[in-house]
Amino acid sequence: MTVLMRGRLLWVASIVAILFLFAARPSAESRVDEPPPAILSSPPAAATDAAKTPDRPAPLLGLYVSLATLQALDFASTRTALNAGGVEGNPLVAPLLASPIGFLALKAGITGATIYVSERLWKKNRRAAVLTMIGLNAGYAAVVGHNYRVAASQRR
């Protein structure tokens, strides 16, 4: 692996780690020191609904941002590898590579659908949502790294 490739992979890993750690910090709004005093005998319906809705797991926002970043890097690294003489290994994606707009739309659709599904999942199983997003981010980071390795090997 060339120094340039190591630098790119280190840069991607650093950005993902920073985004993940930044989003994992609880905000001041999510911390509750003590509940407000009860003025009414029964809370209004809006307050009851808000109390029933659990908070989104803190790491998810960072994982969403890193997924979108990795999708953009996958788009760029795939184009780089193809321009260097590489071949798309996924037969479902290969037909879309003729049109950069089509490929970009696929990447945006995958990102949006993944975030949508994760948003629904965390309300039922918070741990599963976070672990799924970690796994997807790790998978896409591996794909991006592979694409850049292919591009570097084709240029030799």
Image (tube, helix red, strand yellow):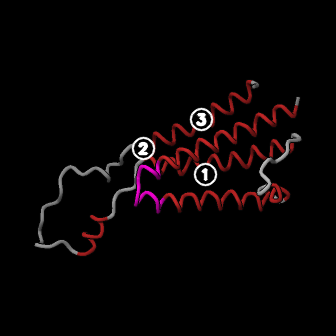
Is 34 left or right of 103, judged from the image as shown?
Answer: left
Magenta region = 119-130
Q: Which disc, if any, is residue 110?
A: none
Residue 135, percent across and down?
A: 55, 44
Q: Circle 3 is placed at which residue position?
A: 13
SS assignment at label 2: helix
CA gap between label 3 and label 2 equals 16 Å
Residue 11 lies within the magenta run: no
Q: Residue at point 47% right, 63% down? A: 120
Amino acid on which disc 3 is placed: Ala
Is 15 left or right of 37, judged from the image as shown?
Answer: right
Amino acid on which disc 2 is placed: Ala
SS assignment at label 3: helix
- Residue 23's place in the image compared with 96, above or below, is above
CA gap between label 3 and label 1 equals 14 Å
Residue 47, percent across and down?
A: 25, 69
Residue 128 lies within the magenta run: yes
Image quarter hosting the C terminus: top right
Q: Which disc, if any, is residue 24?
A: 2
- Counting residues from the start of the chain, the first of labels 2 and 1 encountered is 2
- Counting residues from the start of the chain, the first of labels 3 and 1 encountered is 3
CA gap between label 2 and label 1 equals 17 Å
Q: Residues within 10 Å of mark 3 (few under 14, many from 20)?
A: some
Nearer to me, 51 or 23:
51
Residue 79, percent across and down?
A: 80, 47
Residue 94, percent across and down?
A: 81, 55
Amino acid on which disc 1 is placed: Ala
Image quarter hosting the N terminus: top right
Q: Which disc, if any, is residue 68?
A: 1
